[in-house]
Image (spheres, rainbow, N blue to C red):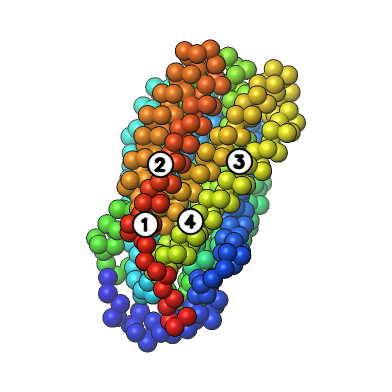
């Protein structure tokens, strides 16, 4: 897509450049000290973390409010979420590739190409959303039939996913626009949007699940429709900000749909597909462990799910660091400041491990209290607390692999990382966990050990790959551009 037309002339580009600088985009001032880099990470990290907490809260609202309505509706929403989450995680990973690509363009001073990348990301979002809806139309019923669910649970799961399907298009578009905003370093914008959407989501859940204010009483299915409406609101707010507010308005993202660019789309897919598959295989691996755990007692299943929920909540910290790290490394690598990119890479990994260690130790010290939030049964509390001891090492291993992978994404090195994670997740984590659980007498604890060793293996191999590409491909002396 060329920008010789009036929508993005050279005159407009230089005007945009001035606005971009005046808006104070954080990347226009490279940091030269370790303290400055730590500050830079936290400036991006905290809003991203709050955004992740907001997204977690929406799932929490769906689960809790459906559970208060009816236990079968809770089960239906849980089944629906277990089907949707791996699909969403994998496909959104493809679209989040816009972030490192755009960040590198900003670093390379090729700002004029960013609008085309984002526009083609939106094209892909629409295409992927249409594909998911079409496949869901034909495959959802047969899939639910195979799960041997009760009629009430199956109906709720079906209706919940149907309701959720109305929000797939805005959700995927939002992920593209969010990646663009993150690439500019303006992470607080998305945070504010997410905070504003939470009361709306809560109110819509209340009205549609329980049938308040003249709306139909839909039970658990209402959570799906409420979430979809919220996604439309989120996407609408984000699009308005991108269109109207500086510095985003300087990029004709929403007026660049002149033609579909195969080259731009291919670039996004080359980076995004390995990213999406890595996320999908990780999520599906945990889903498989959950299925294998179901062979144990109800107490064991409840304790495992409780411990996993706690770990998943804390996992949002390294995930947030990883999202910031991908952009920071991508920008510095694009600007050919390779020393700064390398420093950000290892600084992010160290910060992630330190936070995992601190939060993990706190959970271990207060494990019985934390476990008590999830159950009143003494046996469940005791076993959950036991699992949380292993969760400490699990968290540290997970923190290493997710941030090392994020740094590699910043360098747009994704294919080898994908193969490493595929082998670690499915050829180390699962087989080792299964062996330890069923052939050594460790029981369900064996899965925690298997997951920990698999994630640690992934972290070590990804770190070795990171060292390799930094020495072989990005070993030049840092370049301070524009006379800096």
- Indicate whether 168 appears above or below 241: above
Query: Mark 3 sits on what residue?
Result: 313
Element type at mark 4: helix
Q: Secondary structure at mark 3?
A: helix
Observer able to see residue 403? yes
Eye-nearest disc, 4 or 1: 1
Q: Which mark is residue 471?
A: 1
One can see residue 149 in this view: no
Residue 24 in picture, x, y percent from top left: 55, 76
SS at mark 1 in the image: helix
Residue to which mark 4 is pinned: 345
First-in-chain label (2 vs 3): 3
Q: CA distance from mark 4 to mark 1?
A: 13 Å
Query: Circle 4: is it few (<14), some (14-19), or many (20+) Cα within 10 Å?
Result: many
Q: CA distance from mark 1 to mark 3?
A: 35 Å
Return the mark for residue 398.
none
Q: In the rendered image, which residue does mark 2 sit on?
A: 461
* Circle 2 crowding by C-alpha within 10 Å: few under 14, some 14–19, many from 20: many
Residues tagged 4 and 3 counted as in contact (Cβ below 8 A)? no
Report how far apart the C-alphas of labels 2 and 1 lie in the structure.
Answer: 15 Å
Which class describes the residues within 10 Å of circle 1: few (<14), some (14-19), or many (20+)?
Answer: few
Occupied quadrant, residue 99: bottom left
The answer to which image quadrant residue 63 occupies is top right
Image position, residue 295 (x, y; %): 50, 15
Q: CA separation, marks 4 and 3?
A: 24 Å
Q: Residue at x 47, y 65 (%)?
A: 340
Q: CB atoms at circles 4 and 1 under 8 Å apart?
A: no
Q: Earlier in the sequence, mark 1 or mark 3?
A: 3
């Amino acid at each position: 897509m060329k920008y010789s037309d009036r929508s993005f002339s050279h005159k407009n580009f230089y005007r945009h450049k001035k606005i971009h600088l005046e808006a104070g985009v954080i990347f226009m001032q490279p940091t030269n000290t370790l303290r400055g880099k730590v500050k830079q990470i936290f400036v991006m990290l905290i809003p991203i973390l709050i955004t992740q907490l907001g997204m977690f809260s929406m799932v929490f609202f769906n689960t809790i409010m459906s559970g208060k309505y009816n236990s079968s509706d809770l089960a239906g929403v849980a089944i629906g979420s277990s089907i949707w989450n791996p699909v969403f995680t994998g496909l959104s990973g493809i679209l989040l590739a816009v972030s490192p690509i755009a960040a590198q363009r900003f670093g390379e001073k090729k700002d004029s190409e960013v609008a085309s990348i984002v526009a083609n990301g939106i094209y892909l979002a629409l295409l992927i959303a249409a594909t998911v809806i079409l496949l869901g139309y034909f495959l959802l019923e047969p899939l639910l039939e195979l799960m041997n669910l009760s009629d009430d649970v199956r109906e709720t799961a079906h209706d919940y996913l149907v309701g959720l399907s109305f929000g797939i298009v805005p959700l995927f578009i939002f992920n593209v626009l969010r990646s663009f905003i993150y690439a500019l370093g303006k992470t607080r914008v998305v945070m504010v949007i997410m905070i504003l959407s939470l009361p709306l989501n809560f109110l819509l859940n209340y009205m549609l699940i329980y049938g308040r204010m003249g709306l139909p009483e839909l039970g658990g299915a209402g959570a799906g429709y409420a979430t979809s409406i919220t996604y439309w609101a989120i996407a609408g707010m984000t699009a308005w900000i991108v269109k109207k507010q500086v510095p985003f308005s300087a990029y004709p993202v929403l007026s660049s749909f002149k033609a579909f660019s195969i080259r731009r789309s291919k670039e996004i897919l080359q980076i995004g597909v390995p990213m999406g598959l890595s996320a999908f295989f990780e999520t599906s691996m945990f889903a498989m462990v959950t299925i294998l755990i179901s062979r144990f007692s109800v107490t064991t299943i409840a304790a495992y799910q409780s411990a996993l929920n706690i770990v998943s909540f804390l996992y949002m910290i390294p995930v947030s660091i990883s999202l910031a790290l991908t952009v920071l490394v991508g920008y510095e690598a694009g600007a050919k400041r390779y020393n700064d990119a390398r420093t950000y890479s290892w600084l992010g990994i160290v910060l992630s491990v330190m936070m995992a260690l601190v939060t993990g130790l706190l959970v271990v010290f207060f494990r019985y209290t934390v476990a008590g939030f999830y159950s009143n049964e003494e046996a469940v509390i005791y076993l959950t607390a036991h699992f949380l001891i292993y969760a400490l090492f699990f968290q540290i291993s997970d923190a290493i692999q997710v941030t090392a992978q994020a740094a590699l994404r910043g360098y747009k090195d994704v294919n080898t990382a994908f193969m490493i994670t595929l082998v670690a997740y499915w050829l180390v984590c699962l087989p080792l966990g299964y062996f330890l659980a069923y052939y050594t007498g460790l029981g369900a604890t064996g899965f925690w050990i298997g997951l920990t060793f698999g994630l640690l293996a992934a972290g070590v191999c990804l770190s070795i790959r990171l060292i390799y590409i930094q020495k072989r491909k990005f070993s030049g002396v840092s370049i301070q551009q524009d006379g800096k």
